[in-house]
Amino acid sequence: MESSSGPVKVIIVGAGFAGLTAAIECQRKGHSVTVFEKIKDIKPLGDIISFGQNSSRMFKKWPGVVEKLLPIIHTSQAVNFFDSRGNYITTQSFAEEEEKWGMRINGHRGEIHKILLDYAKSVGIEIRLGHNVTGYFEDEACGGIEVDGERITADVVLSAEGVRAPGRRIVLGSDDLPRPSGYAVYRAWFPSTELINNPLTKHLVGGDTHSGWIGEDVHFLAAAIKNGAEISWVCTHKDDSDIEESWQFPGKVDEVLKVLEGWDPVVQELVKATPPDRLFDYKLVFRDPLPTFISPKRRIVLIGDAAHPFLPTSIQGASQAMEDGAVIAACLDISGRYRVTDAVRVYEKIRYDRVHRIQATGVTTREQWHKADWSAIRNDPTLLHLKRDQWVLDFDAEEDTYNSYAKIASSL
Ligand SMILES: Cc1cc2nc3c(=O)[nH]c(=O)nc-3n(C[C@H](O)[C@H](O)[C@H](O)COP(=O)(O)OP(=O)(O)OC[C@H]3O[C@@H](n4cnc5c(N)ncnc54)[C@H](O)[C@@H]3O)c2cc1C
Ligand SMILES: *[C@@H]1O[C@H](CO)[C@@H](O)[C@H](O)[C@H]1NC(C)=O
Ligand SMILES: CC(=O)N[C@H]1CO[C@H](CO)[C@@H](O)[C@@H]1O
């Protein structure tokens, strides 16, 4: 059958979690892949990032990767919740769901990313670092990119450029502007040496711990990692200032302390112990759901944050980026070279509703905490627990694609 002849030629722009997952899965299915990443010298940037059960099950499909992750990931299976004054409210355990649905992976974004990048290289994927893609084009027969003054074509181009994503322009025909969400997050990650010597914070770093403090329109989460040797915290608060989508926007300890006036001294001590160069101020922006993830001639496809940025409170941004990569690779496997444009439509159909339903949970979780009804919580402390939806977490994106492709393709 002509549809199965020869590997599908795939260009991927961006080596974040979406791009790398797509690359690894495409290679695993025998497609021919080249990745272009604008950063030349990838540094372990960022701080805490979370992968839900059904993206961690993707890591498991890649031999040796989980073994490398185990020593660096967060291991506590429960989170303790407090009110802003430090009164203990409730503990949410993840043990039962991990038993049923598989492990979660939480750790340092840069460290996890490096393990994935090294794995991708080790299986022979061509990753061209330091190549900034400056344009996209397509016709009926192929998609292409402009890079270093050259034009390179393939059967399909996956644009995985992250939240700023210039590639969106060709899909949308215009620029879409981010909107401020009204919130920002202070984020930090640092060694816990000072915390261990402070009687107020010592208990946070005696091993891996996970704690959340919920206040009026502010929440603060802290996770100790590597048996307590390092700690990360995030504080989401109201902020109406200018939009900034960079991960490297310096924050100030004094400003954080102002947001946390009157809060639990444990939290204040934790903030005071934060080295200034390890504190970042990240403004959260919204983007309206895009009308489509695919270009007019269906040769260019948006995946990951480029298609659908998530609020951190959804705790699914990285997982959904990985699911995108797994689904597009599987669709291309089923379609073969000559039906790439069908594969691309099925990909969009499979992903569109799921990512937008999950995206919306970012707002519901924030509101559940920031507008908490404390008298109801005193009666039922589990109202503070994170919602853990089976349809989100107990899901194998690859398997689902093989099961549903034929039906979806025939309905298009
Ligand atoms: C440096 C950095 C640090 C981050 N830290 C955190 C964190 O601590 N916690 C968290 O939850 N999330 C973090 N994120 C975001 C998180 O990685 C994403 O939200 C999520 O994993 C989805 O991944 P993605 O692959 O869609 O996008 P991203 O991870 O943003 O990856 C996009 C990649 O595309 C590359 N790229 C963009 N444009 C071009 C171009 N024109 N040509 C070539 N390459 C291009 C970028 O350099 C980047 O490597 C960070 C992202 C970055 C880039
Ligand atoms: C990549 O190219 C864009 C123009 O398309 C330019 O604005 C940007 O500064 C370049 N980035 C790097 C890292 O070269
Ligand atoms: C739908 C699906 O594949 N669910 C799986 C999610 O992960 C758990 C644990 O690995 C499996 O047991 C489920 O079958």
Image (spheres, grey):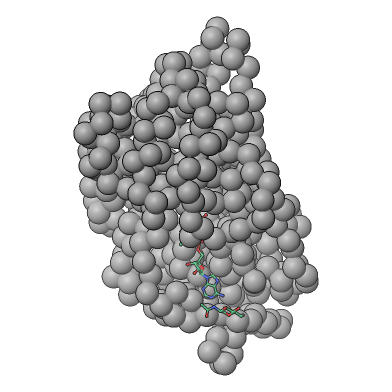
Q: Is residue 9 visible?
A: no
Looking at the image, residue 197 lies above or below residue 286: above
Looking at the image, which residue sits at the far bottom? Answer: 149
**Residue visible at 48% across and 81% down?**
131
Q: Is residue 119 visible?
A: yes
**In this view of the protein, which residue sits in the foreground, 147 or 375?**
375
Looking at the image, residue 251 lies above or below residue 96: below
**In this view of the protein, which residue sits in the foreground, 263 or 377?**
263
**Which quadrant of the figure has residue 291?**
bottom right
Horizontal and vertical percent position of residue 320 = 53, 50
**In this view of the protein, which residue sits in the foreground, 358 or 180?**
180
Q: Is residue 68 left or right of residue 288?
A: left
Horizontal and vertical percent position of residue 382 = 51, 17
Q: Is residue 174 left or right of residue 273?
A: right
Q: Quadrant of the N terminus?
A: bottom right
**Residue visible at 68% across and 81% down?**
138
**In this view of the protein, which residue sits in the foreground, 360 or 247?**
247
Q: How many marks?
A: 0
Looking at the image, residue 176 lies above or below residue 55: below
Horizontal and vertical percent position of residue 17 = 46, 59
**Which quadrant of the figure has residue 97?**
top left
**Residue visible at 54% across and 51% down?**
282
Looking at the image, which residue sits at the far top? Answer: 379
Horizontal and vertical percent position of residue 79 = 40, 27
Q: Is residue 213 left or right of residue 275?
A: right
**Residue visible at 55% across and 18% down?**
383
